[in-house]
Image (cartoon, rainbow, N blue to C red):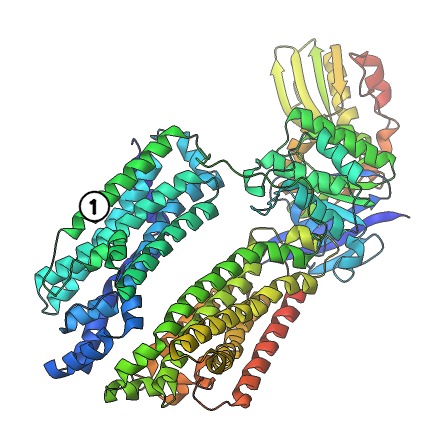
Amino acid sequence: MSNVISVSGVTKRFGRTRALDGLDLEVRAGEVHGFLGPNGAGKSTAIRVLLGLLRADSGTVRLLGGDPWKDAVELHRRLAYVPGDVTLWPNLSGGEVIDLLGRLRGGLDRARKRELIERFDLDPRKKGRAYSKGNRQKVALVAALASDAELLLLDEPTSGLDPLMEAVFTDCVTEARERGRTVLLSSHILAEVEKLCDRVSIIRDGRTVETGTLAELRHLTRTSITAELAGPPDGLADLPGVHGLRADGGRVTFEVDDDRLGDALARLAARGVRSLTSRPPTLEELFLRHYRDGDARTASGSTRTAGGDARSVNRDARPVNGDAGPVDGDARAASGDAR
Amino acid sequence: MTGTGSLVRLILRRDRLVLPLWVLLLAVLPITQTAGIAELYPTERGLREFAASFGANPALVAMYGPFTHWNAAALGVWRAGFTPVLLGLACLLTVVRHTRVEEETGRRELLGSTVLGRQAGLSAALAVAASANLAVALVLLVSFTGAGYPVAGALATGLGYAATGMVFAAVGAVAAQLTESAGGARAIGLSALGVAYLARMAGDSTGASWLSWLSPFGWSQRMRPFAGEVWWPLALSLAAVVLLSLAAYALAGRRDLAAGVLPPRLGPTDAAPGFGSPLALAWRLHRGPLLGWSAGFAVFGAVVGAAAKAAADTMAGNARLMEMMARLGGSANVADVFVASVLSIFGMGAAGYAVQAALRMRGEETLMRAEPLLAAPVGRTRWMAGHLVFALLGPAVVMLVLGVAVGIAYGASTGDVTGRLPGVTGAAVSQLPAVWSLAGLAVALFGLLPRLTALAWAALALFLLLGQVGALLDLPPAALDLSPFSHLPKLPGGEVAATPLLVLTAIAAALVATGLYGFRRRDVG
């Protein structure tokens, strides 16, 4: 198994607060891995543990086959890092900072530096104090992307960039992947993650709550249903696994846990379905669910992993195709509830 | 001007500790000096003798200004003659801190988007400085009249101080409009302060007294507190305050928020060939302070060195003073004693520079500027080493410059440069083990207790206090021995003792090693 990063059960406390509380993270060679979580979830702490800037209290951390705390200098030759909040030296120009960081990593490609500066539309002559947040971010991005590092650790790298620059960034990461680089991308911008990432880990309160490909994550969770019923949706609200039920006359919308989908559809069918739309949750919905009601889940202490979870068994026997529009509810519902 | 009141409250809230602290500290210095002199010389004869010996000392005249009268209050105010410089410094930094720093960090923008007048920030900073200066004046008035000294003298002292403080607050206000960076504004303001002080110094010590009339420090001194007060120089200060403030408002009204009047300079597109190591970066970060301290030590060293012989000649007649100086300086040759005591004060200054340079590491860490380097293939020790070069060798350069400056000037005044230079330079350099042990303390704190690095400053303040008043207060030797400076041989003139120098150097080395070890093992950030 060629994991570039493998973290398991890592904890890190700062005084009384637990920044990391049993974090697991597997990043495979050559993939772009999305690292998602609400503010304060521990993303930056995790990255700083991976950089050997912080020492994990317990658990194991392997990075590029080494121990990030003990082998920091050796490992850092092979990676580049963009911090979430880039601060520059007020009296150094952006170009000087890029050269400094590049030379520390063993030299950088001048032509590539120039090309990236051009693409990111950066004025490298300005002094650190004169840059806006977005421009400071660009300095760090150019320094990292101009390097030959095999692993890129990017901590919310686009937080200060405008949409145009975000697009440039997306291109650069895509190119990096094509060249065989591994990227750990912590981000809040879901469109970016959906576009770029092969696999995603969602963390909350210092522990991993979801990990897998986007497709896997979607299948694991809830399906959004909109249906026109012949009668009122009696009994649907009491059904376990049904969330956010809204009824407007005969029209109902709700989300249902995938393992309860069959029950829900059977109940709908019993009311007489006129039309039915189902779709997998968007990443945004996935997110919001973890951000809002992750408490119950983390309290149970379980980390769900796509493929390794019993509930994912019904993935193949999924009764309602995700992207399909209205389907014939009666027929599918009857056959769908196989379990 | 809308919103000035809220901004004043914000400043007071942010500075609620620092502001009262410097106001009180600076305001009580003159009465403390006066009380000390009154206690040491209870008789008129004693005071006259003290006045005659000190007042004729050209080095002291250069440092404190012309001597006015032999009474205790006039002497006390004269001896506190450096306080207005510190007050000007505090006012200058306060105004820059609440104007340009706020703009540079972008906080002003946040506030500026609310209901706030364009000039509110400037007005609030000047208002706070004015209140602080009035508070200083009030404390001076109350403390002197409370101790039974004449009201007129107390008032002249207070108003003179407040006026000087306000002039430099206004200088700060102008400087804050000129550059985009707070550092640049501070440099401009500090240069103005330095020029004003040097002008007065040159005017008072060379007899070209018109030079002193160019300096705000000269104006307040020529109000002659407790020596037949003269009030009209106050008008000069007030006029300067008004003109400078108007200039600041005019500049502020013409420029954009966060922009400066002087255009920011652009840097190079590519770094110079050698710029690719933690040491090279450290040089860029430390060279400014190193050059500044070196220049300052060179100028003051030359002034003090040139005055040493004259000082010795005037002091030679005063037995009591000789005894006191000998205790501080340790030798029978008065000029040597004078030089030795001055060198030890400069040694404290160099220790301040050493602590400042060492704690730069903590600054880099908390500002998250250590992170990009430590995330590159740079080990923690290598990163620290870059800064340690300047924290340890920087003070060495500065003391060497001082030694050479004092040695040449002192030698020139005695007509024996080749004879004096090596001894004085050696004496200056012999301060280094004590300087290094403070740098070592700062490094050890950085490695082991990074949140408590301010303790290094506290230790320096304690040692300074022990060195200045410890001998006069007859403190127990154990207390005095706490200070590394008390173990240094008293040079030039005293006996060269290698053991304390070696022991102090070893202690410094052990402290630095502790810091290196600690930083390797702790979290960064």
In this rendering, is residue A306 above or below A249? below
Q: Disc 1 is attached to a residue of which chain?
A: B
Q: Position of residue A213 (x, y in %)?
A: 81, 34
Front residue of A262 and A80: A80
Q: Position of residue A14 (x, y in %)?
A: 59, 57
When asked about the image quadrant of residue A167, the answer is top right
Instruction: Tell me the crowding category of disc 1: few under 14, some 14 to 19, or many 20 or more residues within 10 angstroms, Cα based.
Output: some
Query: What residue do we see at 12% from left, 57% from top?
Result: B230
Q: Position of residue B320 (x, y in %)?
A: 24, 87
Q: B248 left or right of B519?
A: left
Query: What residue do we see at 56% from left, 46% from top?
Result: A90
In this rendering, is residue A203 above or below B511? above
Residue B17 visible in rendering: no
Quarter of the image with the C terminus of chain B is bottom right
In this rendering, is residue B352 above or below B333? above
Front residue of B15 and B315: B315
Residue B403 visible in rendering: yes
Quarter of the image with the N terminus of chain B is top left
Instruction: Give SS at disc 1.
Output: helix
Write down the residue under mark 1. B238
Front residue of A37 and A235: A37
In this rendering, is residue B223 above or below B313? above
Q: B429 left or right of B77?
A: right
Label count reads 1
Q: Position of residue B3 (x, y in %)?
A: 31, 33
Identify the residue at the far right of this view.
A1
When asked about the image quadrant of residue A218, the answer is top right
Q: B497 left or right of B486?
A: right
* Amino acid type of the residue that numbered disc 1 sits on in the rendered structure: Leu
